[in-house]
Image (spheres, rainbow, N blue to C red):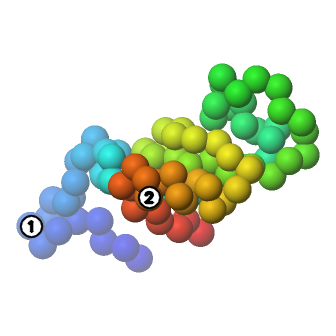
């Protein structure tokens, strides 16, 4: 069991602070199918179905870029001084 409170009995972050943790400094790469791309990137238009794509997302889940290469997504994060983290 994870204790989400500090020694003082209070949560270390408010829900709003936790939601913005890592804003502007942390991003993650998520593999997605082309059929799901329009949900995250509405401006993408029509894409061939069945493709594996990679989305670079901000710490809060906001979309940053879409590419067909994981390496390109990571390179874009580095260029923008974002630390990438792995999610499992």
* Quadrant in which residue 81 is drawn: bottom left
As rendered, which of 43 and 79 lies closer to the eye?
79
Can residue 45 be seen here? yes
Q: Is residue 31 above or below residue 43?
A: below
> Which residue lies most toward the bottom here?
1
Q: How many dots with numbers?
A: 2
Badge 2 or badge 1: first in the primary sequence: 1
Residue, x 70% and y 27% (percent of image)? 44
User: As rendered, which of 13 and 54 lies closer to the eye?
Assistant: 54
Q: Residues within 10 Å of mark 2 (few under 14, many from 20)?
A: few
| Up/down of 81 relative to 33, above or below | below
Residue named by callout 2? 78
Q: Residue at x 79, y 47 (%)?
A: 33
Tag of residue 58:
none
Q: For residue 26, what is the image quadrant?
A: bottom left
Does residue 82 appear to the left or right of 41 in the view shown?
left
Q: Which of the numbered marks, if any, corresponds to residue 8? A: 1
Q: Secondary structure at mark 2?
A: helix
Say which residue appears at 54% left-offset and 39% top-offset.
Answer: 63
Where does the N terminus fall, quadrant-wise?
Answer: bottom left
| Disc 2 from disc 1: Cα separation | 38 Å
Image quadrant containing the C terminus: bottom right
Can you give x and y, in whole percent of width and height, for residue 49 in the image? 90, 39
Residue 7 x %, y %? 12, 72
Is residue 65 shown above or below 25? above
Q: Pinpoint residue 2: horizontal percent, then vertical percent.
A: 37, 73
Taking the image as shown, residue 48 lies to the left or right of residue 44, namely right
């Amino acid at each position: 069991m994870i204790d989400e409170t500090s020694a003082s009995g209070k949560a270390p972050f408010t829900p709003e602070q936790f939601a913005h943790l890592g804003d502007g400094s942390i991003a993650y790469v998520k593999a997605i199918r082309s059929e799901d791309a329009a949900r995250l990137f509405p401006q993408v238009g029509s894409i061939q179905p069945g493709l594996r794509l990679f989305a670079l997302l901000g710490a809060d889940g906001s979309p940053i870029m879409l590419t067909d290469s994981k390496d390109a997504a990571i390179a874009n994060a580095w260029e923008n001084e974002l630390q990438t983290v792995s999610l499992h």
